[in-house]
Image (cartoon, helix red, strand yellow):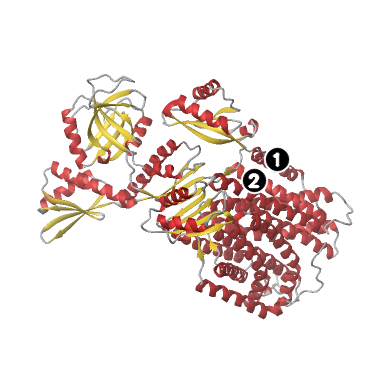
Amino acid sequence: MEFFRIKHDIPFMSYGRYTTAISLVTFLFAIFFLSTKGLNFGVDFTGGTVMEVHYAQSADLAKVRAQLAETGLPDALVQNFGSSYDVLIQVPFKQNFAGAKLSEQVMAGLRKQDASVEMRRVEFVGPQVGKDLIDNGELALLLVSLGIVGYLWLRFEWKFGLSAIIANLHDVVIILGFFAFFQWEFSLSVLAAVLAVLGYSVNESVVVFDRIRENFRTMRKAEVSVIIDNAITRTMSRTIITHGCTQMMVGAMLFLGGETLHYFAMALTIGILFSIYSSVLVASPLLMLFGVSREDFIKPEKTETEEVLP
Amino acid sequence: MNQYPLWKYLLILAALLAGLIYTLPNFYGESPAVQVSPLRTSLKADAALLEHVGNVLKAANLNSELVMLDGNSVKARFADTDSQLKAKDVLVAQLGEDYVVALNLLPRSPQWLTKLNALPMYLGLDLRGGVHFLLQVDMNAALSKALEAATGDIRSALREQNIAYSGVSRDGKVLLVKFRDAGARSKGEAEIKQRFSDFALNSADERGEYNLLVTLKPEAEKHIQDSAVQQNLVTLRNRVNELGVAEPVIQQQGADRVVVQLPGVQDTARAKDILGRTATLEVRMVDETHQASAGAAAPFGTEMFKDREGRMLLVKKQVVLTGERINDAQPGFDNRTNEAAVHINLDGVGARQFKEATRENVGKRMAIILFEKGKGEIVTAPVIREEIGGGRVQITGQMSTVEAQDTALLLRAGALAAPMEIIEERTVGPSLGAENITRGFNSTKIGFIMVALFMMVYYLMFGTISVLALTANLLLLVALLSMMQATLTLPGMAGIALTLGMAIDANVLINERIREELRNGITPQAAIHAGYDRAFGTILDSNVTTFIAGIALFMFGSGPIKGFAVVLCLGIMTSMFSAVMISRAIVNLIYGRKARLTKVAIG
């Protein structure tokens, strides 16, 4: 079986202007939503308390809210979580409340109302921790970016490193844009997914770049754009099959992994889809833009001159 | 050209065998168990305790599947939770207060696997349920306490030497000592310099006032902070013991934070209470006019306490000194006799109180009692040889260095060195933990089956080989995780699924390359060779970049994210091995020998 039997190279580079425009527009949209709506940071980053409680029968959210207001938490966010039996309670961090004790007070109140309530999960994060996590996250992002650029520079050429990382940061911004637009919760595991995408989607560019380098050696007479077109066309089958396989795994997590893994898998899904696009249609045009040439790989052969030896 | 030397086959075989052995324990599951560990360092879990536990269980007619010695505890495994709970009650009643009896889970894997050190993966709190606390030690309070103590010490030192000073006051991190004239100041400076090596001195004159600014040296400050954290760790460890948790984790994280993880604990309110409780220390005189006897009521005005060896002592109710007056207690040696000793440092008020008490009671015994949870225990009860002034006390006599360390720890544990605050809490109920395991497992399973089916249909024989390599990858990864006893978390399980999804990339690259070479018209043998050869560089490059991301996640991630990063990095290594070497070995075995290969099944 073979899905992709492409006879002639697809002239991707001649579409360069359109594809760059498309990604520029998506990118700007992502930036727009990030700056207007912002990320919906989870309790990991903002500090506060999240509780998941389970009732034996369908929970009455209004009653839970009333009970919380009585406990002194009128601004607690109460919603169903997964099923009508499970309730998620979110309380933002408060200066005057003994943070770690809060969950006990809430549970005591809820138990008074309905003895069947069962505590499933409590997460309390103080504001100091949240700040550390954001700092560390930024540091990790920077380190990964520098590491990748450095490695690709070493293995290929700076032009490759730079265009790969631009393409991938573009993916990251788009993932963040999705999270901002839908106001999905941005938690620690989503951050992990984003960083994993950064490492993973570089794969894509690396595979294409590898082929480009090889083509420079084998297709001696061809033009740069022809070489890139050929490299993309010939790796396309692999690109789509690999990503399809990874997506099967991620899809299983998305639908079966439960609430905790849902947004993790969501970030990966968006990352995988856009990394196909960006590595082919963003990184390669950028490479052209930076003026990649055969001389980057093949040292011009020394012209043999006659020598006179004594 | 497609043949491996024998050693490569053997290497692969050995790796797979090791993988199988170390993966195996994960399939046996766990049984309810009871874990008995001694509370004090002086008590050891040994063969005697093992036998004792065995006898107690036998006497109670409880059939344990296995009773064994493991590290510094005795573990007994049972078939069901019912007998586990009964066994716990029986053991608590029989062993008394010197041992902690905790409920635990023990792997059900057979003995020979355990002997090979093959243990199942260590499950994180989000999978087994439990509490995670992150506590922040208030360093400023620790420094303030030290400086406050120094204020009193400097005062009494100057008074002792009859050096005229007009005041000692503290302003933030600086102590200001005021003198009447320059002569007194230089004398005072010399005296303080000699006695307190931890402080840096600066003279500052101001409108006819002769002042001395005393600040902590940076290294002394660091030492105070370090020992504050250490002391808090010790105190926490003692308190957690009391909770009866099977495998608690109490670790320093960063400069001023402590992680406490209590697997299986559901009663978070009680855990918080116990962690936040302050123990108190009291010094009282021993009542030597009456004889202490177990069971008898203590005479009026006295109380009966056990000492650490379990002997009873009668102690007067009147308190000589409380624990707040103790600045520090360190193990060390006597200057003259070189015996092991505990050096105690009292603050100014304490020194005065102690001096009075010792003057009146030369030749008598005093008792230092540690109160926790309203129950007192005598840490040590030395005889007073002479009047002790100056706030420096030394306890010696019949002490080993280990005992001296223990005593010093307990004396310091009287109060937390610095207040702590819970800045992070994560509690996962047991039902959610079990659910997380099923979800993680199911999504990995379904994903794996889908990928396997697709690969086999799309690449036929080569797809099947890829799936075999992927299975080997999963086996090796789980084996590595079990071997390292790395903590498996839900993100870690996601990591396993993700690495499997990414590992198939290497095989897709190879298979596509072989197809392409075949299309170019070269012979199947050459195509296989070229496919593996050319794809390798690409596989390496693309894995290294993911590896970089994994390392960064490991360095900067916390808790569950670290688990994800570990799995990601290990998974990359195993996938390099299995996708390239193992799949190649299978291909070589199948096709390598055929000299005139005309067709391969690659779809």
Instruction: Count residues near mark 1 (Cα–Cα under 10 Å), then give few for <14, some for 14-19, many for 20+.
Output: some
- Indicate left or right for B69 with B415 as reference: right
Q: Is residue B186 left or right of residue B141?
A: left
Classify mark 2: residues with Cα within 10 Å, few (<14), some (14-19) or many (20+). Answer: many
Give the mark toward the camera: 1 or 2. Answer: 2
Q: Position of residue B175 (x, y in %)?
A: 21, 53
Left or right, B218 with respect to B166, comes to: right
Q: Answer with the quarter of the image where residue A300 lies.
A: bottom right
For marks 1 and 2 on the same chain, the one whose residue lies earlier in the sequence:
1
Q: Residue B370's quadrant in the figure? A: top left
Q: Amino acid at mark 1?
A: Leu
Residue type pointed to by label 2: Val
Q: Nearer the viewer, residue B192 or A74?
A: A74
Q: Nearer the viewer, residue A211 or A275?
A: A275
Q: Mark 1: which secondary structure?
A: helix
Q: Residue at x 54, y 54 (%)?
A: A59
Q: Chain of mark 2?
A: B
Q: Residue at x 18, y 32 (%)?
A: B357
Q: Can you give x and y, in whole percent of width and height, for residue B98 in the image?
A: 42, 28
Q: Which mark is residue B478?
A: 2
How far separated are the C-alphas under marks 1 and 2? 13 Å
Do discs 1 and 2 belong to a common subunit?
A: yes
For the C terminus of chain B, the quadrant is bottom right
- Residue, disc 1: B17
Q: Quadrant of residue A236?
A: bottom right
Residue A304 visible at all: no
Position of residue A122 measured from the top left corner of the image (x, y, whole percent): 49, 51
Q: Say which chain tag 1 marks.
A: B
Secondary structure beneath disc 2? helix
Where A284 sits versus B451, above or below? below
